[in-house]
Amino acid sequence: MGIKDKATYGEYYWAMQVEAQQALFDGVENDLAPHFNAMFRDIVAIEDLDPAYKSFLQSFITPESSTAGMASVRFASEVADGIVTQGLAPAVRVVKHASEVKWLSNILTPTQGALLKRRRKITDEYGDILMKFGGFPEEQRKYLYDVIEPYPSIPELITYCRYHGDPKNVWTPLLEFYDMQAVDYKLYEWLGRQRITTVQAQSLFKRGIFEPPDFYAELEAIGWFDENRDYIKDLSYVLPNSMLLVQGGLIQGLDNERILENIS
């Protein structure tokens, strides 16, 4: 029994199938391999590409079995489909726009309807209709309505809890309003604290409470670049107004040129 020595109809039928598959495989290899080679040669040449991927792509370029050939046909079909789809996208978009103009079928989304209902821009009945069009059951409509309600930020909630409870124990009352992890609370609690500002640091420096190293360290924590710290230090001192500078210059007996230089 074999392809060349067919003795029965069944053997003949089987042999014809094998020959047809081989012919198709040969056609795939001859017709598609050059295109795959042009498409994949730059990708396969990438040094960091995983060897398994290189081997997989190489199987499309030079298929070694009918199975690989069939996979190549499927892959080629997908690639061609993608190219045609993307190429026709602008034309399809024009058709879609024309259809939208004709039918005017779009309506507000359930979220938009809930927002407008909360703002009293539409009736409750119409808001419920939009919810139904979105497929929301009654219980879910209530949840959607609640989720779009403006809600204080976490720092605002922390501030509220400080003023309406023990400022040293914000965590406990905060949990009544927000489900927060303890590790995240540390971050938000610190961000909600007041910190020394640049002007306050300058005042403390002028009063001698901050020594230069302390002052520079505070400026760095505030966020000033190292090259700007001396400038901020100089700005700690306020120059007298022009009238006082003129009076001081006259008392010191400075000439007019020097006085003008001081106030310019």
Image (cartoon, grey):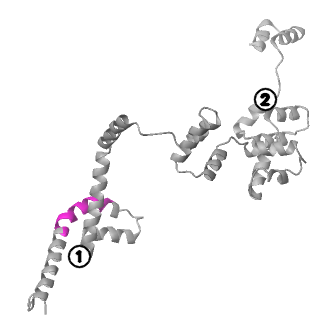
Q: Name the quadrant of the N terminus.
A: bottom left
Please tell me whether residue 172 is drawn above or below residue 58 in the rendered image. above
Q: Which residues are magenta?
A: 28-42
Q: Amino acid at mark 1?
A: Ser
Our reading of the magenta stretch's main secondary structure is helix
Percent coordinates x, y for residue 238 in the rendering? 82, 23
Q: Is residue 88 magenta?
A: no
Q: Residue 17 has which mark?
A: none
Front in this rendered view, residue 251 or 118 = 118
Front in this rendered view, residue 72 or 253 = 72
In the figure, residue 196 lies in which quadrant?
Answer: top right
In contact (CB < 8 Å): disc 1 and disc 2 = no
Q: Is residue 64 visible?
A: no
Q: Is residue 10 left or right of residue 48?
A: left
Q: Is residue 148 left or right of residue 67?
A: right
Front in this rendered view, residue 82 or 48 = 82
Q: Residue at x 84, y 39 (%)?
A: 212
Q: Residue 66 has which mark?
A: 1
Please tell me whether residue 233 is drawn above or below residue 155 in the rendered image. above
Q: Residue at x 54, y 42 (%)?
A: 130
Q: Is residue 33 magenta?
A: yes
How crowded pointer 1 is (Cα within 10 Å; few <14, some 14-19, many 20+) is rated as some
Q: Which residue is mark 2?
A: 234
Q: Name the quadrant of the C terminus.
A: top right
Residue at disc 1, secondary structure:
helix
Q: Residue at x 83, y 26 (%)?
A: 237
